[in-house]
């Protein structure tokens, strides 16, 4: 699982699961509950912290910001660190403006290409998880005072 999809999975588990996870109901049951809740979700707002590591270059980059999504296809990612970076999609086109790494450059991507994955990152992860992932239990952690499994 890539760092980006792993971050999305953690965000989905944190955001959607309302009942505490126990060893009895297991990871697959929890994932099924999340996927079911996601079907009825039309909008999402989340703050994020992410770390992307490039093993070839031996470097890591951290960023923070706000992720907004309106289904289908609309997305806005506003970075607070690095400030000024932005990704916006309207369902037809995805605009990528990252002056921190590519000054003066704006990428315009079709919404049905790689941009579609960004525009509905959680949908890509949650709509067909059993075909794309092996679902297993995880460590018990506490997030904002709630018992969860990662």
Image (cartoon, rainbow, N blue to C red):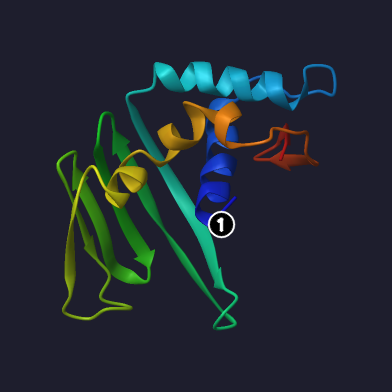
Residue 57 on image: x %, y %: 54, 83
Q: At which x and y percent is residue 118?
A: 35, 47
Task: State whether residue 84 is above or below residue 41.
Answer: below
x and y percentages locating residue 15 in the rendered image: 53, 33
Up the image or down, 65 lies above or below 27; here it is below
Quadrant showing the C terminus: top right
- 106 displayed left or right of 25: left
Query: Residue 138: which quarter of the image?
Result: top right
Q: Could you tell me which residue is drawn at 34 percent across and 61 percent down?
A: 79
Q: Quadrant of residue 43?
A: top left
Which residue is denoted by mark 1 in the rendering?
Answer: 3
- The residue shown at (60%, 25%) is 17
Residue at the far right in the pictured view: 23
Report the residue at 26% width, 29% height from top. 72
Task: Please name the residue shown 47% across and 26% down the image.
Answer: 127
Q: Left of 36 or right of it: where is 121?
A: left
Q: Quadrant of residue 27?
A: top right
Look at the numbered disc 1 and give the secondary structure of its residue. helix
> Label 1: few (<14), some or many (≥20) within 10 Å?
few
Q: Residue furthest front?
A: 131
Tell me where residue 61 appears, x and y as whole percent: 50, 73
Considering depth in this image, is 56 or 3 the residue closer to the camera?
A: 56
**Residue 141 left/right relative to 94:** right
Against 67, residue 60 (above or below) is below
Number of marks present in the image shown: 1
Q: Tell whether 91 sits left or right of 4.
A: left
């Amino acid at each position: 699982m890539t760092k980006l999809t792993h971050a999305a999975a953690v965000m989905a588990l944190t955001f959607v699961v309302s009942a505490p996870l126990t060893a009895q109901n297991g990871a697959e049951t929890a994932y099924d509950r999340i996927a079911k809740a996601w079907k009825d979700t039309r909008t999402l707002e989340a703050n994020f912290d992410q770390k992307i590591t490039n093993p070839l270059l031996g470097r890591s980059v951290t960023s923070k910001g706000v992720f907004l999504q309106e289904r289908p296809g609309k997305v806005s990612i506003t970075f607070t660190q690095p400030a000024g970076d932005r990704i916006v999609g309207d369902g037809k086109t995805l605009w990528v403006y990252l002056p921190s790494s590519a000054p003066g450059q704006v990428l315009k991507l079709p919404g049905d290409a790689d941009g579609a994955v960004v525009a509905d990152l959680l949908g890509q992860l949650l709509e067909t998880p059993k075909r794309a992932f092996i679902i297993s239990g995880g460590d018990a952690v506490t997030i904002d005072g709630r018992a969860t499994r990662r």
